[in-house]
Image (cartoon, rainbow, N blue to C red):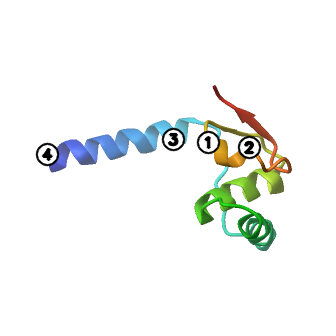
Amino acid sequence: MARIRRRSRRHALRLMDSFSVQWVSCEPNILEIASRIKAHGRLSVADSWIGATAIAYGATLVHKDPEFEPFKEIPQEVLK
């Protein structure tokens, strides 16, 4: 069982490495935006960071989470 989990983890990592992914660290600008989002809504801390990262990088957040919809400052595409 442990061997299968290790193989699955390696496969998942290889799959992630095949995408054009930009890893983002904890930046002061994102922290400031995330704290504003968290203070003004009912998003979790993690979702606040996700939304703040989208704002900071000018990225579009693609999601199915209705909790993001009130945040018009977050560029977003809602999946139905």
Tell me the residue at 76%/50% (across/down).
54
At a point 71% along the width and 66% down the height, the residue shown is 38
What's under tag 4, amino acid-wise? Answer: Met
Residue plotted at (77% across, 48% down): 70
Compared to 10, does 38 lie above or below? Answer: below
Mark 1 burial class by Cα count in 10 Å: few <14, some 14-19, many 20+ = few
Q: Mark 2 points at which residue?
A: 69
Image quadrant in which the C terminus is located: top right
Per the image, label 1 sits on a secondary structure element best described as: loop
- Image point (65%, 59%), residue name: 43
* Image coordinates for residue 14, horizontal then vertical, percent: 45, 40
Question: Residue 69: x and y, percent?
Answer: 74, 43
Residue 53 x, y percent position in the rendering? 74, 56
Mark linked to residue 16: 3
Disc 3/disc 2 C-alpha distance (Å): 27 Å
Q: Which of 3 and 67 is in front in this view?
A: 67
Would residue 55 appear left or right of 8 to someone viewing this image?
right
Is mark 4 in CB contact (under 8 Å) with mark 1?
A: no
Q: Distance between the residues labelled 1 and 3?
A: 23 Å
Location of residue 9 with respect to 30 vertically, above or below: above
Residue type of the residue flagged with mark 1: Asp
Disc 1/disc 2 C-alpha distance (Å)? 8 Å
Q: Which amino acid does label 2 sit on?
A: Glu
Residue linked to disc 1:
65
- Badge 2 crowding class, 10 Å Cα cut-off, few under 14, some 14 to 19, many 20 or more, is some
Q: Which of marks 2 and 4 is in front?
A: 2
- Going from the N terminus, do you reach mark 2 or mark 4 first? 4
Front position among marks 1 and 3 = 1
Q: Mark 4 points at which residue?
A: 1
